[in-house]
Image (cartoon, rainbow, N blue to C red):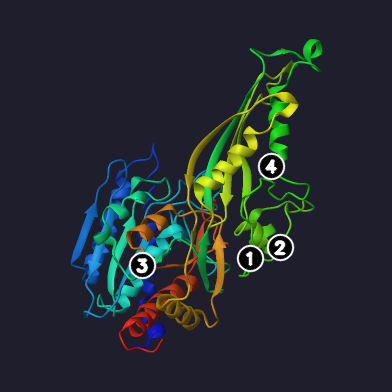
Amino acid sequence: MDTAAKVDALMDGLRADLERLAAIPSVAFPGFPAEPVQEAHDLLVGMLRDIGVERIERIDLPGTAPVIFAEIPPPSPDAPTVLLYSHYDVQPPGDEKLWLSPPFEPTPVEGGLRARGIADDKSNVIAHLGMLRAYEGRPPVGVKIVFEGQEEYGSPFDDYPPSDPERFACDAMVIADLGNLRPGTPTLTTGLRGASEVVVEVRTLQEPRHSGEFGGAAPDALLVLLTALSTLHDVHGDVAVAGLRREEWSGTTYTEEEFRDLAGVSDGVPLIGSGSLGERLWSGPAITVIGLDAPSVEHAASAVVPYARAKLNLRFHPRQDAKEAQRLLVEHLRALRPFGVPLTVTPGDTGPGYEASTGGPAYRAARTALREAWGEDASYVATGGSIPLVNGLARAAPGAEVLLFGAQDSMCNLHAPNERVLFSELRNTVVAMCAFVREYAADFRPGAAS
């Protein structure tokens, strides 16, 4: 078939379905109603049935929203099976006063639509459906579909796939929960940094003491904590915890101007760290103070602070062991004695990173497909964010190639006000998905040229 022409003919319907889906406030966080999540689930089940998908199941696990699992059998015994993943829940809208239009009223913007969750991840749900429509429900590969309903908040489904490996068995999987480095730049994400949290506490006095009478000798807990935190980075802003892995980044990355704009860095404020942005963001560690318990400036008293606490978020190299990375940070902090005061260090949650193997037939097919869709060779990037389910699916299907690409782009404002998706990225993603299954089926068959 003429893939591009077929997809172009489908775009009006795909856009309409994306608007319908994005209008549903399917936030699966505590405190939000469950009915919209169920409504989004039911809408997608109906769309799958309309395509002709016959086997559709609902996976219900304790403490999470329903997962849609659907399956199209391979067209022949020697055809591969591809698992397609995305999620239909969304982040909360946040402060709605910061939105230029109501977050759950899909609104036209130049070249696309604005709404909460329209990029992350409903555009990728629609991209999967678009590929199936292009093949009229009969793609040249077997297909397993996983549409999750509580990815943004986190759920026990992250760890479920290894307990049911037969269900998730496949030859390749496309995790569509991200997208391109920038609009118009086809991108394959090949690495995910791991993540860990650590809490560090200091208690020095039984209660606050007058800073005029006791300051200078009584140990200030906040000063002790700040001194400890200052050891985590060197003079350049690079992480100074020994043993945390850092390597040069050889793939594509942002320009500094792009990154400053994306991060909202104020004019005149330098970036921290040294080396390439890819090295700082993806193939090296980062430690961020994400919370601090200390007296506020507004309610400050003239007293020596008796207690202070900080929560740290550690991101580490995709190939570094998660427990090792957390242990290195914990040991660094526990070895400190700022002004002779010991710290209480408590490790929290940790999750592994992931690095894909890129030499197999699925990656060959993906490179061809992305070139066909966007007209240029794919770039390779990593991400500092984590997708915990990737590791769960990889453990369930250890021989499968894992590809991460989709219709989002780094400038789509995901998790922020005024999230948007571009029709060009959605269209090209559907074209790429169609070309990928075509090329993968051809390359996978016994006797095909490699």
Q: Which percent across, then down, holds residue 445?
A: 31, 84
Q: Earlier in the sequence, mark 1 or mark 3?
A: 1
Q: Which residue is mark 2?
A: 256
Q: Quadrant of residue 110?
A: bottom right
Residue type at tag 1: Trp
* Disc 1, SS: loop
Q: Are marks 1 and 3 in contact (CB under 8 Å)?
A: no
Residue type at tag 2: Glu
Query: Left or right: 273 with respect to 394?
Result: right
Residue type at tag 4: Leu
Q: Residues within 10 Å of mark 3 (few under 14, many from 20)?
A: few
Q: Earlier in the sequence, mark 4 or mark 1?
A: 4
Q: Residues within 10 Å of mark 2 (few under 14, many from 20)?
A: few
Task: Examine the rendering and report whether any part of residue 58 can be seen.
Answer: yes
Q: Quadrant of the C terminus?
A: bottom left
Real-space Cα distance between discs 2 and 3?
Answer: 38 Å
Q: Which residue is mark 3?
A: 399
Q: Which residue is mark 1?
A: 249
Q: Is residue 397 above or below residue 341?
A: below
* Disc 2, SS: helix
Q: Which residue is mark 4?
A: 232
* Disc 4, SS: helix
**Looking at the image, is mark 2 or mark 1 nearer the viewer?**
1
* Disc 3, SS: loop
Q: Quadrant of the N terminus?
A: bottom left
